[in-house]
Amino acid sequence: MLTKWAAKNKATLKDLVSNKDVIAQLERDSGFKAEIGEFTFNDIVKALKAPSQDPRTEFKSFEYRKDISKITDLKIGEWYPGIVTNITQFGAFVDIGIKENGLLHVSQISDTFVENAMTALKVGQEVKVQVLEVDLDRKRISLTAKKGASASFTPSAPASKAPAKRWWILKLKTMHFLD
């Protein structure tokens, strides 16, 4: 659209970026404004008047721990920096720099009671989490962000595979009610 406008008005795209008279001519063109819509038109004019400004939010870099690259590198009780990638009613998933995201259960988000994970966390938020449990068979990681969490927390292994599916949920519920 802008290329057509420039050709119609005997201007180049370079003129649109650098020539204030051409930008002013574009700004006065009510027909072009009606053709592309007011919001788009205003965005174009604003961008042409300040071409060096980037409308995107500032990118903030994040660095994961360099000593881990796979789930087997994780150590129970260790703290890892991470980024919240998804939030659900039961907690949040945190990327700690490996293929698998860890689960930060709602009862493990804070030392204080958190009813809804969405009120305490935001997607993209940087967090520091501690590994509570690693289930290599199912590739699941249980995390906590509680400052008062015991660094030596080591869950006892369930007697069989069947209770294993419910064991960590019962443990988290128990811990939740003790808060």
Image: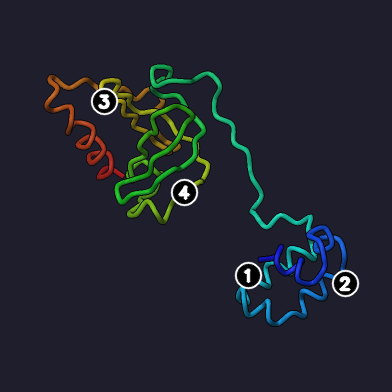
* Distance (Cα) linking label 4 and label 3: 25 Å
> In percent of the image, x 49 and y 35: which residue is there?
82
Please give the residue where the numbered disc 3 appears in the rendered image: 138
The image quadrant where one finds the C terminus is top left
In the image, residue 94 lies at what x, y percent? 43, 38
Mark 4: which secondary structure? loop
First-in-chain label (2 vs 4): 2
Mark 2: which secondary structure? helix
In the image, residue 167 lies at what x, y percent? 19, 31
* Distance (Cα) linking label 1 and label 3: 49 Å
Mark 3 closeness class: few <14, some 14–19, many ≥20 residues within 10 Å: few
Please give the residue where the numbered disc 1 appears in the rendered image: 40
* Distance (Cα) linking label 2 and label 4: 44 Å
First-in-chain label (4 vs 3): 4
Q: Are marks 4 and 3 in contact (CB under 8 Å)?
A: no
* In this rendering, the label closer to the viewer, 2 or 3: 2
Residue 161 in the image: above or below residue 165? above
- The label shown at residue 123 is 4
* Distance (Cα) linking label 1 and label 4: 29 Å
> In percent of the image, x 41 and y 20: which residue is there?
75
Residue 95 sits in quarter: top left
* Distance (Cα) linking label 2 and label 1: 20 Å
- Please name the amino acid that badge 4 sits on: Val
First-in-chain label (2 vs 1): 2
Q: Are marks 1 and 3 in contact (CB under 8 Å)?
A: no
First-in-chain label (2 vs 3): 2
Residue 132 sits in quarter: top left
Please give the residue where the numbered disc 2 appears in the rendered image: 21
